[in-house]
């Protein structure tokens, strides 16, 4: 009674995972992409390693297996039918592992949604209305919700919002210093993102250390192509680097992060760039890509090792911003007990982790170089035994967090 189907839907694709929220074991996952294009693709993976293969599953294989097919996919409804076909043809059986609910990742909940929410027609209207704050994300999520409700009409559907975890920020942290009436009229404030990941990692870190979440001051670095850092006091977000949109904050793969707003005015006047062109520049052609011509941190690090000047500068700018936020959040929290790194870069780059914390010895942070270089799949400590601050690498699992929150609402 704890199987949940988790959906992460965009405008032309959706990911899915069938997961046991009680044990954390995934049974299957997949991707339906290039929806509405000339040729779409369905990728379906069955995980047998954590589950005894029985019935139709046993006829397929006793090990994890991936199945792919390419064909036109007209819309999300057609995509969900192809997902059902993949389960029926390749397993696991949705009769044997019947989901009790469907959990949906929704990027923006504004200030209205601060917890997982059972999806009703009114909630759908609100998600649609909030598309003005997330035009690239909420419309796709809504398409996925409607297609999923058509496919699983007898199940409860729950929206889990990326912004919800950050709704505990105090007004001093989320308020921009602009005309108050204008800001209120157009809902201009800091919302924060990656909240599902920050919540999962902070709770996993506390559980790993065997300490009450309420007693810990934590800083969590979620470092992927998109990146954010959050100050967490007693399990509550008190500050985070992303703002009205995911553009604010850290230097990212293709996003600029923080910059003087007057840069936009200057480029509009001097380079005669339009608003769409500036939007494209700051979101898709900036960050380390803009500085070095590549957006993957592995390529940046390879360039640093070769002595490439552009890659070296890009890395130094990236690390400088990480240290700036680490210091700011140390001050906001009045000290820190745990610092965690997660997501693709955070989990896999010893150089980024070491550089981010290189100047924090004054705060009791002491990295063990050998531990930092070790690879591993689970939670691992990379600080020394004598370090006053525990530094961890914590693999994130947003699908599991969505599944858990979905069960909380439907149980």
Image: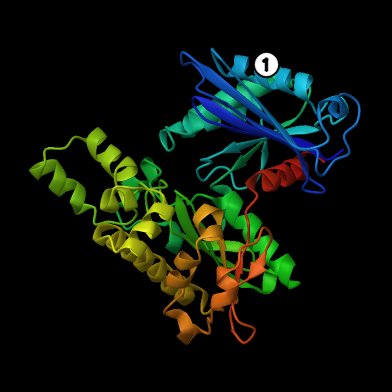
**Number of residue marks:** 1
Q: Residue 355 is drawn in which quadrant?
A: bottom left
Residue drawn at the location 49% of the way across and 26% of the way down: 11
Would residue 125 be found to the left or right of residue 84 on screen?
left
Q: Which residue is mark 1?
A: 81
- Residue 249, by quadrant, is bottom left
Residue found 49% across the figure and 83% down from its top? 363
Q: Secondary structure at mark 1?
A: helix
Quadrant of the rendering where the N terminus is positioned: top right
Judged left or right of residue 122, residue 193 is left
Q: Is residue 249 above or below residue 210?
A: above
Q: Quadrant of the C terminus?
A: top right
Residue located 67% across and 63% down the image: 379
> What residue occupies the far left of the structure in this picture?
270
Is 120 placed above or below 297 here?
A: above
In the image, 306 versus 114, the foreground residue is: 306
């Amino acid at each position: 009674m704890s199987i949940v189907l988790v959906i992460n839907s965009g405008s032309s694709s959706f990911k899915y995972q069938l997961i046991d929220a009680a044990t954390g074991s995934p049974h299957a996952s997949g991707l339906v992409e290039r929806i509405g294009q000339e040729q779409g693709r369905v990728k379906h993976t069955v995980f047998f390693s954590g589950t005894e293969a029985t019935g139709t599953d046993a006829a397929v294989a006793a090990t994890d297996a991936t199945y792919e097919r390419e064909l036109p996919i007209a819309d999300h409804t057609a995509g969900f039918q192809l997902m059902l076909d993949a389960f029926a043809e390749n397993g696991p059986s949705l009769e044997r592992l019947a989901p009790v609910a469907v959990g949906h990742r929704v990027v923006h909940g504004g200030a209205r949604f601060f917890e997982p929410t059972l999806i009703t027609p009114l909630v759908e209207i609100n998600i649609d209305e909030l598309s003005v704050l997330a035009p690239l994300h909420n419309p796709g999520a809504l398409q996925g919700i409607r297609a999923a409700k058509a496919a699983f009409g007898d199940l409860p559907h729950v929206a889990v919002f990326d912004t919800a975890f950050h709704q505990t920020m105090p007004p001093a942290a989320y308020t921009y210093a602009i005309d108050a009436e204008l800001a209120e009229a157009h809902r201009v404030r800091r919302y924060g993102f990656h909240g599902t990941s920050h919540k999962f990692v902070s709770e996993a870190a506390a559980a790993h250390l065997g300490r009450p979440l309420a007693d810990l001051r934590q800083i969590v670095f979620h470092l992927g192509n998109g990146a954010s850092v959050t100050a967490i006091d007693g399990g509550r977000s008190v500050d985070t680097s992303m703002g009205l949109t995911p553009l604010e904050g850290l230097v990212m793969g293709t996003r600029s992060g923080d910059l003087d707003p007057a840069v936009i005015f200057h480029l509009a006047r001097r380079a005669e760039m339009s608003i769409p062109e500036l939007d494209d520049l700051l979101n898709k052609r900036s960050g380390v890509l803009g500085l070095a011509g590549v957006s993957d941190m592995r390529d940046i690090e390879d360039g640093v090792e070769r002595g490439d000047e552009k890659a070296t500068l890009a890395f130094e700018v990236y690390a400088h911003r990480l240290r700036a936020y680490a210091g700011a959040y140390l001050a906001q929290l009045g000290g820190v007990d745990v610092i965690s790194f997660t997501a693709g870069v955070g989990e896999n780059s010893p150089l980024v982790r070491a550089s981010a914390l290189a100047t924090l010895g004054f705060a009791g942070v002491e990295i063990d170089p050998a531990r930092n270089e070790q690879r591993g799949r689970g939670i691992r400590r990379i600080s020394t035994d004598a370090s006053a601050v525990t530094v961890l690498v914590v693999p994130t699992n947003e699908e599991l967090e969505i599944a858990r929150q979905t069960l909380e609402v439907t149980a």
